[in-house]
Image (tube, rainbow, N blue to C red):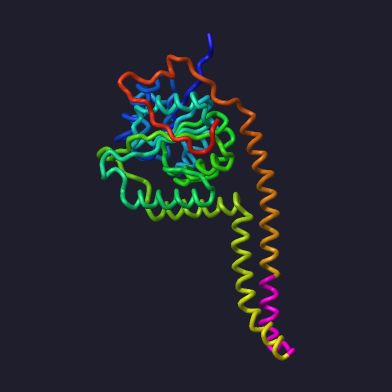
Amino acid sequence: MAVQPTIACVVPCHNEEAAVGKVVLDLRAALPEADIYVYDNASTDRTVEVAREAGAIVREEPRKGKGNVIRRAFADVEADALLIIDGDDTYDASRARDLVNLLFEGPYDQVVGARRETVSAAYRAGHATGNKLLTGAVRSLFGNDVTDMLSGYRVFSRRFVKSFPALARQFETETEMTIHALHLRLPTAEVPVDYRVRPAGSESKLRTFRDGWRILRVILDLARRERPSLVHTVVAALLALVSVVLGIPVIADFIRTGTVPRIPTAILAAAIMTIAVLVLLVGYILESLMHMRQEQSRLVHLAYAAPASRSSHHTRPRAGTDPVPVRNVSGSP
């Protein structure tokens, strides 16, 4: 008899007493064979007690920040498919089976639950606009079609989890996940899932401007590290432009009079042009180092087997459900 792949669910929580119990029960109904872990992130309410009463395995991560929870969970939890979902009951946890099945059927390394509003109040205007802007920035920098970069509802293969560095500390962890998949060109799919308002008594920890700025800084930093030749070329071009603007009058004077009356300006223009050339060369050196690091990450990823197909019992859609619409985002398996 074939051994069935193992499944684990990770639910990061900070003060989610009002919602976490329902999330755990919905996950248990959708994936009765899965291990469900609630990672309490320094809660001051009854999150831990409610999660245990619902039947979850509760673990603690005292360092605040969703990124810290993901880093801990990815290191500790062993499973062939690992699902993450926020503990605020805004995502439809009953669709967990669809996401997991798709991961194995692909096989994919990541399946993202792309949010679809059920009511207008579910997705604040500032968050929706910020998500579109940040997703557009990633698509421009990394050249791929991603519709919901900041979704917190995802399923990963074991090889994604064990090759993911998890360096983020806060809400920018979803950005890091997206760019990791694009960086290694991992097969990824999206499934539309309902996104609804929080239950009464549950408060959002995401701050539009503060966390949006943090995510934008992460994107720029990742662009510097993952696309060094592009970033350094832009910086070098700007420096070269300044040098040319400063140097043209000096050259014009020399052609007209045969002398260089503005020696300090000539020295400054030459120095800036030298810096521009050095910046460009450093960019190409970093690009070579990035390719070496990318090769190492790829080899770590390939050290783990692809997600194995599941039995027909588990791959069959639930009764009364429609086929799941799928978008292949970053390559085919």
Residue at 68 percent of width and 87 percent of height = 253
Q: Residue furthest top?
A: 1
Rendered location of residue 82, percent (x, y):
48, 29
Instruction: Give the total number of marks visible in the rendering.
Output: 0
197 or 295, which is in the foreground? 295
290 or 215, which is in the foreground? 290
Where is the C terminus found, in terms of image quarters? top right
Q: Residue furthest bottom?
A: 257
Is 285 placed above or below 195 here? below
Side of 201 relative to 44 (left or right)? left
Is 322 placed above or below 291 here? above
* Main secondary-structure element of the magenta-colored stretch: helix
Q: Is residue 267 magenta?
A: yes
The residue range painted magenta reads: 258-273
Rendered location of residue 109, percent (x, y):
53, 32
Q: Residue furthest right?
A: 258
Residue at 45 percent of width and 42 percent of height = 66
Residue at 42 percent of width and 31 percent of height = 38
Side of 323 relative to 137 (left or right)? left
Side of 27 relative to 164 (left or right)? left
Rendered location of residue 202, percent (x, y):
30, 40
Residue at 31 percent of width and 34 percent of height = 19
1 or 59, which is in the foreground? 1
Rendered location of residue 147, percent (x, y):
42, 43
Q: Is residue 97 magenta?
A: no
